[in-house]
Every structure is written in C-alpha cells, then in structure tokens.
Image (cartoon, rainbow, N blue to C red):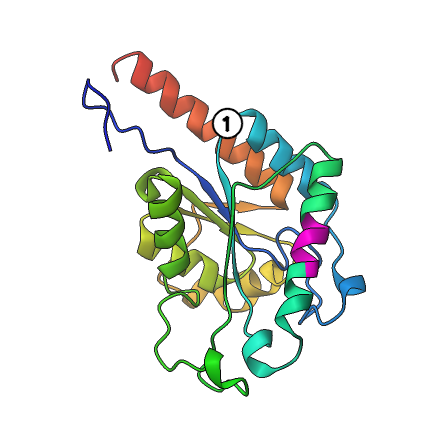
Amino acid sequence: MSDRNGKNKKKAAVFLDRDGTINEQMGYINHISRFQMLAGAAEAIARLNREDIPVVVVSNQSGLARGYFPEELLHQVHDKMNRLLAAAGAHIDGLYWCPHHPDARVERFKKQNCGCRKPGTGLLKQAAEELGLDLGRSYMVGDRWSDLQCGVRAGAVPILVLTGYGRGDLEYIGREQQVQPAHVAADLPDAAAWIINRIAQFRKGSNSGC
C-alpha cells in the first residue's frame, strides 16, 4: 500500500509477547487470579499509544491444546488485561494467539507443523496483513529466545526483556544463539523508551534527507 508520492503508508508496530512481558510469568494462566500485570507495563503501552505506534500482542497459548484451561478462561484473561490497560489510559491495537501444540489433548488444536506458534511467524504476518503493518520496520519484544527468533524471521527488530524468563534465557542459552537481541531491556517500560527513541531518530534522519 502506498500514497500518491509512493511512500509506504504501512505503520511500524510493536509486537509484544504476553506472559513475562506484559504480565507476571506464572506458567499457565489457568485461573483469572493468576493474571497479574507487571509494574509499569500498562504505562509503557500507553506511551507507545501516545506516539501513535500500533501495539499488537502475539502469544503462544498451548495450554488450550493441552487441556489445562478452557477457551472461555483465555477470553476472560484478555478482558481483564484490556480493563487494566484502559484504567491506565492504554490500549492494544491487536491480539493474536496460537492455541496449537503437536501433543495436544484437545484434538482440534493438535498440529504437527503449526506456522503460528512462535518462533513461527504466522501471528505477525496475519496481524500485518489485517492491520496494515510494515514488519520490516517493526519490533518484537519478548522474554524468550523464541520471541526473538520469531521477530527476526518476520523481519522485525528483536528486543529481549529481562522480566519473566528473560534473565535466565540471557544468562544460560543466549550466548549459544545465532539470533541476538538488538537491545536488552530491563522491562517493558525500558523497551518502549528505546523503541520510541529509535523511531524518533529514524524520522529525524528521514526528514533531513539522510
């Protein structure tokens, strides 16, 4: 999609993992009480909103496939997340999740080669098509190396947060990985600040003809 001057009208977006990035990493969220927002996460998303940067949550939810919780609970959890975000003046522009797993107990969620389960890029590509996003100028933020790998495969800039599994992944498996984060952030507020600054520098460079 382009305007009359041939410029790309698709927006750069921030893709966020859910568990360990937005909310506390507690394993499977099999009860509504287990969903607890991380300190500063809602405010970080609100800051991205104010900069007119689309925010899209992309999450593996294999607990559905494994039969650990019903789909109704997942919707309740996301309703709670949206309410907490709204209370902080924040919102997300899209929410995509993968319910599949090759060892699923729930037959309809059983898939051997699922393209949407991260590090697969299906969720990002679906969001990009439906929301008009430019993956090549976007960012993928998460606490697992699979998030970073997903981002790189989709053409996005990978950012690791040290919340959730992030600190352990960085210390114990990060050095062995071919994919490395463009930035290691203490948390989502740190990641949002880095992204906003990077986009501002890019815009400044573009306006000066660099």
Q: Report the residue that reaches farthest toward the right.
A: 33
Q: Amino acid at mark 1?
A: Asp
Q: How many discs mark residues in the rendered view?
A: 1
What is the quadrant of residue 105 in the picture? bottom right
Position of the N terminus, as image quadrant, is top left
User: Does the magenta-highlighted stretch encompass residue 80?
Assistant: yes
Q: Which residue is mark 1?
A: 52
Residue lying at 48% horizontally and 78% vertically, measured from the top left: 109
Q: Position of residue 133 (x, y in %)?
A: 36, 40
The range drawn in magenta is: 76-81
Is residue 50 at all visible to an observer of this figure? yes
Q: Nearer the viewer, residue 104 or 187?
A: 104
Looking at the image, residue 158 lies above or below residue 64 = above
Q: Position of residue 22 (x, y in %)?
A: 64, 51
Residue 10 placement, left or right of 170? left
Looking at the image, residue 185 lies above or below residue 11 = below
At label 1, counting other C-alpha atoms closer than 10 Å, the crowd grade (few under 14, some 14-19, many 20 or more) is: few
Q: Nearer the viewer, residue 13 or 84?
A: 84
Position of the C terminus, as image quadrant, is top left
Is residue 156 at all visible to an observer of this figure? no
> What is the secondary structure assignment of the residue under circle 1?
loop
User: Does the magenta-highlighted stretch encompass residue 22?
Assistant: no
Residue lying at 65% horizontally and 74% vertically, measured from the top left: 70
Residue lying at 56% horizontally and 57% vertically, measured from the top left: 143
